[in-house]
Protein backbone atom coordinates (compact mmCIF):
# COMPACT_ATOMS: atom_id res chain seq x y z
CA UNK A 1 0.00 0.00 0.00
CA UNK A 2 2.70 2.47 1.00
CA UNK A 3 4.78 1.63 -2.06
CA UNK A 4 2.05 2.67 -4.48
CA UNK A 5 1.00 5.88 -2.72
CA UNK A 6 2.27 9.34 -3.54
CA UNK A 7 2.32 12.79 -2.01
CA UNK A 8 0.37 13.53 1.16
CA UNK A 9 -1.23 10.06 1.23
CA UNK A 10 2.22 8.40 1.12
CA UNK A 11 3.53 10.73 3.82
CA UNK A 12 0.53 10.07 6.09
CA UNK A 13 0.96 6.30 5.85
CA UNK A 14 4.73 6.47 6.19
CA UNK A 15 4.60 8.67 9.27
CA UNK A 16 2.12 6.31 10.93
CA UNK A 17 4.58 3.41 10.78
CA UNK A 18 8.04 5.00 10.67
CA UNK A 19 8.50 4.97 14.45
CA UNK A 20 8.03 1.21 14.53
CA UNK A 21 11.03 0.85 12.21
CA UNK A 22 13.31 3.37 13.96
CA UNK A 23 16.82 2.43 15.11
CA UNK A 24 15.83 1.59 18.69
CA UNK A 25 13.01 -0.71 17.60
CA UNK A 26 15.22 -2.40 15.02
CA UNK A 27 17.81 -3.06 17.74
CA UNK A 28 15.06 -4.55 19.89
CA UNK A 29 14.08 -6.84 16.99
CA UNK A 30 17.58 -8.23 16.40
CA UNK A 31 17.26 -11.14 18.85
CA UNK A 32 14.06 -12.24 17.09
CA UNK A 33 15.86 -12.06 13.75
CA UNK A 34 18.76 -14.14 15.09
CA UNK A 35 16.41 -16.73 16.60
CA UNK A 36 14.49 -16.94 13.33
CA UNK A 37 17.57 -17.47 11.17
CA UNK A 38 18.85 -20.07 13.65
CA UNK A 39 15.51 -21.91 13.49
CA UNK A 40 15.54 -21.76 9.68
CA UNK A 41 19.08 -23.15 9.59
CA UNK A 42 18.12 -25.91 12.04
CA UNK A 43 15.19 -26.77 9.79
CA UNK A 44 17.05 -26.67 6.46
CA UNK A 45 20.61 -27.81 7.35
CA UNK A 46 19.70 -31.50 7.91
CA UNK A 47 18.74 -31.68 4.24
CA UNK A 48 22.45 -31.54 3.41
CA UNK A 49 21.90 -29.56 0.22
CA UNK A 50 19.07 -27.22 -0.62
CA UNK A 51 18.17 -24.42 -2.96
CA UNK A 52 19.54 -21.31 -1.24
CA UNK A 53 17.10 -19.10 -3.16
CA UNK A 54 14.13 -20.93 -1.59
CA UNK A 55 15.81 -20.79 1.82
CA UNK A 56 16.50 -17.06 1.50
CA UNK A 57 12.96 -16.38 0.27
CA UNK A 58 11.63 -17.74 3.57
CA UNK A 59 13.71 -15.41 5.71
CA UNK A 60 11.85 -12.05 5.39
CA UNK A 61 8.43 -13.66 5.73
CA UNK A 62 9.50 -15.75 8.74
CA UNK A 63 11.05 -12.66 10.32
CA UNK A 64 7.82 -10.69 9.89
CA UNK A 65 5.81 -13.58 11.29
CA UNK A 66 8.03 -13.64 14.36
CA UNK A 67 7.97 -9.85 14.75
CA UNK A 68 4.19 -9.58 14.51
CA UNK A 69 3.37 -12.74 16.44
CA UNK A 70 1.99 -14.60 13.44
CA UNK A 71 1.04 -18.27 13.73
CA UNK A 72 3.71 -20.30 11.91
CA UNK A 73 1.01 -22.79 10.89
CA UNK A 74 -0.32 -20.09 8.53
CA UNK A 75 3.07 -19.53 6.93
CA UNK A 76 2.71 -21.96 3.96
CA UNK A 77 -0.50 -20.25 2.76
CA UNK A 78 1.11 -16.82 3.11
CA UNK A 79 4.27 -17.83 1.26
CA UNK A 80 2.19 -19.39 -1.50
CA UNK A 81 0.06 -16.24 -1.77
CA UNK A 82 3.17 -14.04 -1.88
CA UNK A 83 4.57 -16.17 -4.71
CA UNK A 84 1.32 -15.85 -6.66
CA UNK A 85 1.25 -12.13 -5.94
CA UNK A 86 4.72 -11.86 -7.46
CA UNK A 87 3.37 -13.22 -10.74
CA UNK A 88 1.11 -10.17 -11.05
CA UNK A 89 4.05 -8.32 -12.60
CA UNK A 90 3.81 -10.65 -15.62
CA UNK A 91 0.51 -8.92 -16.45
CA UNK A 92 -1.17 -12.08 -17.72
CA UNK A 93 -4.88 -11.28 -17.71
CA UNK A 94 -5.87 -14.93 -17.30
CA UNK A 95 -4.01 -15.03 -13.96
CA UNK A 96 -6.12 -12.23 -12.48
CA UNK A 97 -8.56 -14.47 -10.52
CA UNK A 98 -5.68 -16.45 -8.98
CA UNK A 99 -3.81 -13.25 -8.10
CA UNK A 100 -6.91 -11.69 -6.56
CA UNK A 101 -7.51 -14.85 -4.51
CA UNK A 102 -3.91 -14.67 -3.25
CA UNK A 103 -4.40 -11.03 -2.24
CA UNK A 104 -7.54 -12.01 -0.35
CA UNK A 105 -5.55 -14.60 1.63
CA UNK A 106 -3.04 -11.90 2.58
CA UNK A 107 -5.71 -9.33 3.49
CA UNK A 108 -7.64 -11.88 5.60
CA UNK A 109 -4.46 -12.91 7.41
CA UNK A 110 -3.65 -9.32 8.37
CA UNK A 111 -7.25 -8.43 9.25
CA UNK A 112 -7.61 -11.59 11.39
CA UNK A 113 -4.30 -11.03 13.15
CA UNK A 114 -5.20 -7.45 14.05
CA UNK A 115 -8.70 -8.47 15.14
CA UNK A 116 -7.26 -11.26 17.33
CA UNK A 117 -4.81 -8.83 18.89
CA UNK A 118 -7.34 -6.11 19.61
CA UNK A 119 -6.65 -2.39 20.02
CA UNK A 120 -4.79 -2.82 23.32
CA UNK A 121 -2.19 -5.26 22.00
CA UNK A 122 -0.27 -6.60 24.96
CA UNK A 123 2.36 -8.75 23.26
CA UNK A 124 5.14 -6.14 23.13
CA UNK A 125 5.96 -6.93 19.53
CA UNK A 126 6.04 -5.05 16.23
CA UNK A 127 2.32 -5.41 15.66
CA UNK A 128 1.66 -3.77 19.03
CA UNK A 129 3.99 -0.94 18.00
CA UNK A 130 2.12 -0.48 14.73
CA UNK A 131 -1.26 -0.54 16.47
CA UNK A 132 0.01 1.98 19.05
CA UNK A 133 1.31 4.19 16.24
CA UNK A 134 -2.18 4.39 14.84
CA UNK A 135 -5.71 5.02 16.04
CA UNK A 136 -6.62 2.41 18.64
CA UNK A 137 -8.17 -0.36 16.55
CA UNK A 138 -10.09 1.56 13.90
CA UNK A 139 -10.01 0.73 10.22
CA UNK A 140 -7.03 3.05 10.01
CA UNK A 141 -5.14 0.57 12.19
CA UNK A 142 -5.98 -2.18 9.71
CA UNK A 143 -4.56 0.02 6.97
CA UNK A 144 -1.43 0.56 9.05
CA UNK A 145 -1.01 -3.16 9.66
CA UNK A 146 -1.65 -4.01 6.03
CA UNK A 147 0.78 -1.37 4.86
CA UNK A 148 3.51 -2.42 7.25
CA UNK A 149 3.13 -6.13 6.70
CA UNK A 150 3.05 -5.64 2.97
CA UNK A 151 6.11 -3.42 2.84
CA UNK A 152 8.12 -5.48 5.27
CA UNK A 153 7.32 -8.73 3.54
CA UNK A 154 8.27 -7.14 0.22
CA UNK A 155 4.71 -7.33 -1.04
CA UNK A 156 3.56 -4.65 -3.43
CA UNK A 157 -0.17 -4.35 -3.05
CA UNK A 158 -2.60 -2.93 -5.59
CA UNK A 159 -4.41 0.28 -4.89
CA UNK A 160 -7.35 -0.69 -2.75
CA UNK A 161 -9.90 1.16 -0.72
CA UNK A 162 -10.14 -0.37 2.73
Image: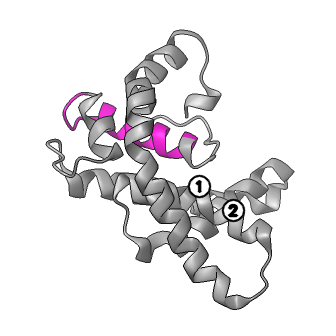
**With 10 as the anchor, is 85 left or right in this view?**
right
**With 33 as the anchor, is 94 left or right in this view?**
right
Q: Are marks 2 and 1 in contact (CB under 8 Å)?
A: yes
Residue 125 placement (x, y as % from top left):
30, 48
Q: Which residue is found at the position 85% from the left and 52% from the top?
A: 90
Residue behind mark 2: 57
Task: State the SS at label 2.
Answer: helix
Q: How far is disc 2 from disc 1 in space, using C-alphas?
A: 7 Å
Magenta stretch: give its range: 135-151
Quadrant of residue 113 within the rendered picture: bottom left
**With 48 as the anchor, is 140 left or right in this view?**
left
**Residue nearest the viewer, comparing 151 with 39:** 39
Is 149 in the magenta? yes
36 over 51 or under it: above or below? above
Q: Which residue is found at the position 24% from the left and 32% from the top?
A: 132
Task: State the SS at label 1.
Answer: helix
Instruction: Bin the neighbour count of mark 1 within 10 Å (Cα to Cα): few under 14, some 14-19, many 20 and up.
Output: some
**Given the current orientation, which residue lies at the most extreme bottom position?**
47
Marking on residue 60: 1
12 over 68 or under it: above or below? above
Amino acid sequence: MLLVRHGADHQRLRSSVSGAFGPNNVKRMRPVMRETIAALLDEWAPRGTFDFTKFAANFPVRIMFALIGGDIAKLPAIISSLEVQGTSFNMVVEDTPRIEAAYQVLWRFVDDLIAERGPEGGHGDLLDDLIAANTGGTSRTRNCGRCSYSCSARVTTPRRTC
